[in-house]
Amino acid sequence: MTRSITILGGSGFVGRSIANRLIAAGYNLRIPTRDPEQVHPDIRILPETEILQADIHDPQTLKDLIAGSRCAINLVGILNEKGRDGSGFRHVHVELPRKLLAACRAQGVRRILHMSALNADPINGPSHYLRTKGEGEALLHEQTEIQVTTFRPSVIFGPGDGFFARFAGLLAIAPGIFPLPCAQARFAPVHVVDVAEAFARAIDDRVTFGRRYDLCGPREYTLAELVRYTARCRGLSRAVMPLPDLISRIQAAILDFVPGKPFSTDNYLSAQVDSVCKCSGLNALGIRPSPVEAIVPRYLRT
Ligand SMILES: NC(=O)c1ccc[n+]([C@@H]2O[C@H](COP(=O)([O-])OP(=O)(O)OC[C@H]3O[C@@H](n4cnc5c(N)ncnc54)[C@H](OP(=O)(O)O)[C@@H]3O)[C@@H](O)[C@H]2O)c1
């Protein structure tokens, strides 16, 4: 059987770890991107990896991309969109999985590994992000012709992450006090290497076909605890001040209009449900999750 795997969204933070793990396992990879110039050097130097500029939303391009693949991996996701109506989320989280399914059917690719998010739910998800992630997941799992496995992580950490590294940057420029919205929201951060291991183990494991795995690290923390920990790792003396709920919401509504949306109303709504696992998918896959304390100081202190 072919050892070729196409990874949509393979140029991002999680994609880097998955690509490394799959190359080590002897696969060859095809990674489309909107802009090859922006692709991280760690991916560009990978052997057996073809990086190509492509519009993955074009159905014919997508078909051509996955031709001959043993498996298609979909990591494409956005935390925020330009408008506020959810149409950008729908385009990326719902329409793209639908197109990927059609492309797999057309090309005889019988395996998809899909990245969703913890608490994704097409009906009860509190935010556009979580509802559209839930819709994408549901449409992939409501058919049986193609074997789909979905992963639903809490926040993912590792060098270059958008969580610890981002808070470290924000703390560095804050004066003595750091006002924090949604400070009591709970997370169980999961190491990106463990996430990559879950993807790698699932490729040929029939037990995982049709299943969805919630991925969490070994401990739960409030956002305030994680931000205070980040400050300590960086040696920064900052008083983290939890904001009342109404102020958090108002701050999000204001930041909706700031370019790059450092925090948005949709992010605020996502944080209304705790991002923690009832049942650990990593345990089910035989992976021992790495604790934050064993990994984060290594890259935050440098
Ligand atoms: N990181 C986390 O803590 C976390 C937690 C839960 C779930 N997830 C999910 O995990 C997946 C990967 O996350 P990540 O942190 O690796 O994200 P990332 O670093 O932002 O990477 C996202 C990738 O998706 C591609 N992409 C983004 N928007 C696109 C668009 N409109 N059209 C085509 N391609 C697009 C980008 O490719 P190019 O820019 O190269 O085209 C990039 O490679 C996402 O689905 C995310 O929702 C992440």
Image (cartoon, rainbow, N blue to C red):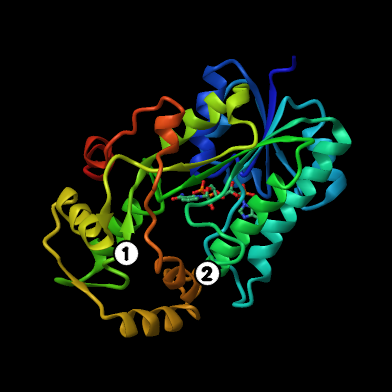
Spatial CA span between label 2 and label 1: 15 Å
At mark 1, the secondary structure is loop
Q: Which residue is mark 1?
A: 185
Q: Nearer the viewer, residue 270 or 55?
A: 270
Q: Is residue 237 above or below residue 188?
A: below
| Residue 83 in picture, x, y percent from top left | 62, 76
Q: Is residue 177 above or below residue 30?
A: below
As shown in the figure, which amino acid type bears the numbered disc 2? Ser
Task: Report whether 25 appears left or right of 85.
Answer: left
Is residue 42 something one can see in this rendering? no
Quadrant including the C terminus: top left
Q: Quadrant of residue 37?
A: top right
Q: Which residue is mark 2?
A: 127
Q: Is residue 82 above or below residue 219?
A: below
The residue that appears at 70% across and 57% down in the rendered structure is 94
The residue that appears at 79% across and 36% down in the rendered structure is 145
As shown in the figure, which amino acid type bears the numbered disc 1? Ala
At mark 2, the secondary structure is loop
| Residue 63 in picture, x, y percent from top left | 84, 39
Specify few, some or many for label 2: CA neighbours under 10 Å numbering under 14, 14-19, or 20 or more.
Answer: many
Task: Report whether 42 appears left or right of 146.
Answer: left
The residue that appears at 75% across and 27% down in the rendered structure is 69
Q: Nearer the viewer, residue 242 or 254?
A: 242
| Residue 199 in picture, x, y percent from top left | 54, 31
Going from the N terminus, do you reach mark 2 or mark 1 first?
Answer: 2
| Pointer 2 with pointer 1, Cβ within 8 A | no
